[in-house]
Amino acid sequence: MTVLLVALGAALGAPLRYLVDRAVQARHDTVFPWGTCTVNVLGSLVLGVLIGGAAVGAVSGSLVAFLGVGLCGALTTYSTFGYETIRLFEDGARRAALFNAGISVTAAVGAAFLGVTLAEALWA
Amino acid sequence: MGPQRPPVDPDVELDQPSRRAALPDGAASLLTVIAVGGMTGALVRHGLAIAFPHPPRGFPWATFAVNVSGCLLIGVLMVLITEVRDAPRLVRPFLGVGVLGGYTTFSTYAVEVQQAVTAGAARTGLLYLAGTLVAALTAVWLGTALTRLAAGVQRNRSAG
C-alpha cells in the first residue's frame, strides 16, 4: 500500500516539477536555473511540514508516503541541480555556479526548518 | 542536426525566454513519460531507503548514495544524448526529467539535515550537508568527463 502511494505521489511530482520549472524559467531571461531552485525549496518546505506533523501525530504515515516520499521526493531533484551547477561552471559562469549551490542548499535547509517549525506551531 | 552544446537547464529551452513556458507539441506523451519515469525512480529510491535505514543521529547513507549515483548518471546521460548522438524526443524527458529526477531528491536531503541537527547530531548534519554537495557535484563532473573520454568527444564550447 505504501509503495502504491509513493508511486502515485511521484507520478504527480515529476510532471509538476517539469511544469513549475518551465513556468519559472519563462519569467526571467537569464540562464540561471531559478526553476529547479524553486521546486527544491518548495518541496523541502512541504516535506518539513509533513515530517514535523508526523512527529506530533498530526500527519499519517500514508500521507507522508504519498505527499512526502512520493510527491515532494519527485518534485525535488539533486541530479538536475547538480548538472545545472556543473554546466554553469563549465560555461565560465563560476560565480553563478557557486551562487546556485549556496542558495539552493541554504534555502532548502532553511525551508525544511521552517516547515517543521510551522507544523509544530500548527499541531503541537 | 548535429550534437549540440548541452543546455544549463536540461529541462527547458533557455535560448528563447518567450518559449520557456510553452509546452511543445505532444505535451500529453511528454508528461506521461515524465510521470512513468518519475514513478520508477522514486520506487527505487524508496526501496533503498527501506533497505538501508539510518538511526536519528546517524548519517543518511541511503539518500546520500541515491543523490550521488543519480548525479553520476545524469552526467553520463546528458553527454550521451547531447554531445555523442541525437536521441529520440522522449529519451531525455523519460530518463533525465523522469527517472533520475524522481530517483534523486532535494527535499529528503534538506529534511534529513534538519532532523540530524534537531536530534543533537549537528556535526553529522553538517557533514551530510557538505558531503552530499561535494560528492554530487564531483559525480556530475566525473560522469560527463568519463563519458566524453569513452566516446572520444571533445567538450564543445564553440556555441557558447
Image: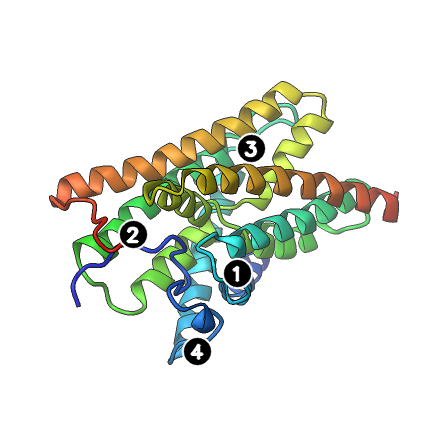
What residue would you read off at disc 4? B28
Q: Is residue B59 above or below residue B84?
A: above
Quarter of the image with the C terminus of chain A in it: top right
Query: Where is residue B98 shown, x and y percent of the image?
Result: 42, 59
- Helix, strand or loop at mark 4: helix
Is residue A32 visible to us here? yes
Q: CA distance from mark 1 to mark 2?
A: 19 Å
Amino acid at dot 3: Pro
Asked whether the residues under marks 2 and 4 belong to the same chain, the reply is yes
Q: CA distance from mark 1 to mark 3?
A: 27 Å
Chain of the residue displaying label 3: B
Amino acid at dot 4: Ala
C-beta proximity under 8 Å, tags 1 and 3: no
Chain of the residue displaying label 2: B
Amino acid at dot 2: Met
Q: CA distance from mark 2 to mark 4?
A: 23 Å
Chain of the residue displaying label 4: B
- Helix, strand or loop at mark 1: helix
Q: Nearer the viewer, mark 2 or mark 4?
A: 2
In terms of depth relative to the viewer, which is nearer, B97 or A63? B97
Tag on residue B78?
Answer: 2
What residue would you read off at disc 1? A17
Query: Where is residue A1 shown, x and y percent of the image?
Result: 59, 57
> Which residue is depicted at the point 41% across and 60% down?
B11
What residue would you read off at disc 3? B53
